[in-house]
Amino acid sequence: MFVRTEATILHADLDAFYASVEQRDDASLRGRPVIVGGGVVLAASYEAKARGVRTAMGGWQARALCPDAVVVPPRMKAYSAASKAVFAVFRNTTPLVEGISIDEAFLDVAGLKRLRGDPAGIAVRLREEVLREVGLPITVGVARTKFLAKVASAVAKPDGLLVVPPDGELDFLHPLPVERLWGVGRVTAERLHSRGITTVAQVARLPEARLVSMLGRAAGHHLHALAHNRDPRPVRVGKRRGSIGSQRALGRRPRTAEDLDAILLGIVDRLGKRLRAAHRVCRTVVLRLRFADSSRATRSHTLRESTASTKVVLSTARDLLAGALPVIEKQGITLLGLTLSNLDDQNAVQLALPFGKAPDGTLDATLDDLRERYGATAVTRAVLLGKDQGIQVPLLPD
DNA sequence: TCTGGGGTCCTAGGACCC
DNA sequence: TCTGGGGTCCTAGGACCC
């Protein structure tokens, strides 16, 4: 196996991404605490973070901590455009880019030495270029492995750059708290803490069998490898989504079956549109539920053939919902969601269609097209009208 | 008053097949 | 007929990540 001997993996991570876009686009927000999101904090500027505001915190709590914060509603289109521009800068640096989310990616710059210099220099220029071209601050970690590069960027935040040299890896890694290890969240951290294990060095001293018995086969094996600084994962280009989903929090008030059906319809409509826009098809439909006591449940069905048809997905989702109504009645529903998985490329399926069979997507395509031209709310299925709160009466332009 | 929405991966049991 | 081994797919739940 090829073992990398130089620090040639970059982890690039935009700082307080949504909040930074807002500060970029509105000069009056610069230098001030900014919170993106209403009911829940989607992003907080570093001025707000300094006051204790954190992502995923309740809005009321955030405002209590930071009463002078400017709260702005999210502008997903602006963030998505900014993300595209930043990824263009990434790909201009190296074709080996693995996107992790809207605001972070791994870049493999091995083999670019002749062309662009050493990784540290590349990282410096990458940061400059993102700031110049897109106007956003970004932090970069550089290391021999993905894991170390990711930790390096987390340590260097905000607006920083940190290189972990190959001969300094264990000194960097071992004092870290276990929470820094990938795959260690609340539950695993608590399991380790309860045995007196708080640092990566302590994890490294445990036999692998012990970790496996504590955490299960995959997690135990994975943590053992990370703590011993063995992270063989390469930077992978062109990973595709395995599923797409949408969900709606419903609050605690009771909902009738008709309410739920209308909400489900809205979700299916949105998902179908996204699925077709991505030229994908799905085979499995998963209904997601959350109950008043915060417990969760899923109900799924796998179709015989893949589909991108709103009609097919909707009838499957409705069957699942109907089957779950007794549980919902008993427990009280607080969230309804749907995930489409087992995704495939549309081409693969179209080839299999018998000749002469009209695809079931004619209405879907027409609706998608109308919305594309006149806006998302221009066309609404009849069942939605007057059901979902706040839905606008659709107006088609003449 | 646990709040949001969008994802990935792993585990485990049962069905079914060889 | 019973016992054994091995594999894949589906369903449900759970941990974790941004």
Image: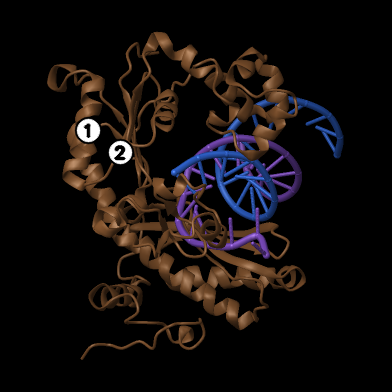
Chain colours: A brown, B purple, C blue
The quadrant in which residue A89 appears is top left
Amino acid type assigned to the residue bearing label 2 in the image? Ile
Amino acid type assigned to the residue bearing label 1 in the image? Leu
The quadrant in which residue A300 appears is bottom right
The x and y percentages for residue A337 are 55, 64
State the residue at coordinates (43%, 29%): A155
Residue lying farthest front? A68
Q: Nearer the viewer, residue A218 or A100?
A: A100
The x and y percentages for residue A213 are 73, 25
Up-down relation of residue A243 to residue A129 (above or below): below
Q: Using the numbered discs, state the Cα–Cα distance from disc 1 to disc 2 in whole angstroms.
A: 9 Å
Q: Nearer the viewer, residue A272 or A295?
A: A295
* Sooner in the amino-acid sequence: mark 1 or mark 2: 1
**Could one spot residue A23 in this view of the protein?**
yes
How many badges with numbers are in the image?
2
Up-down relation of residue A357 to residue A27 (above or below): below
The x and y percentages for residue A375 are 28, 76
**Could one spot residue A94 in this view of the protein?**
no
- Mark 1 — residue? A126
- Could you tell whether A339 is left or right of A190 in the image? left
Up-down relation of residue A148 to residue A179 (above or below): above
Badge number at residue A138:
2
Q: Nearer the viewer, residue A71 or A222?
A: A71
Q: Nearer the viewer, residue A273 or A20?
A: A20
Quadrant location of the N terminus of chain A in the rendered image = top left
State the residue at coordinates (26%, 21%): A120
Residue lying farthest left? A115
Mark 1 surroundings: few (<14), some (14-19) or many (≥20) residues within 10 A:
many
Marks 1,2: beta carbons within 8 A: yes
State the residue at coordinates (36%, 42%): A15
Label 1 and label 2 in one chain: yes
Quadrant location of the C terminus of chain A in the rendered image = bottom left
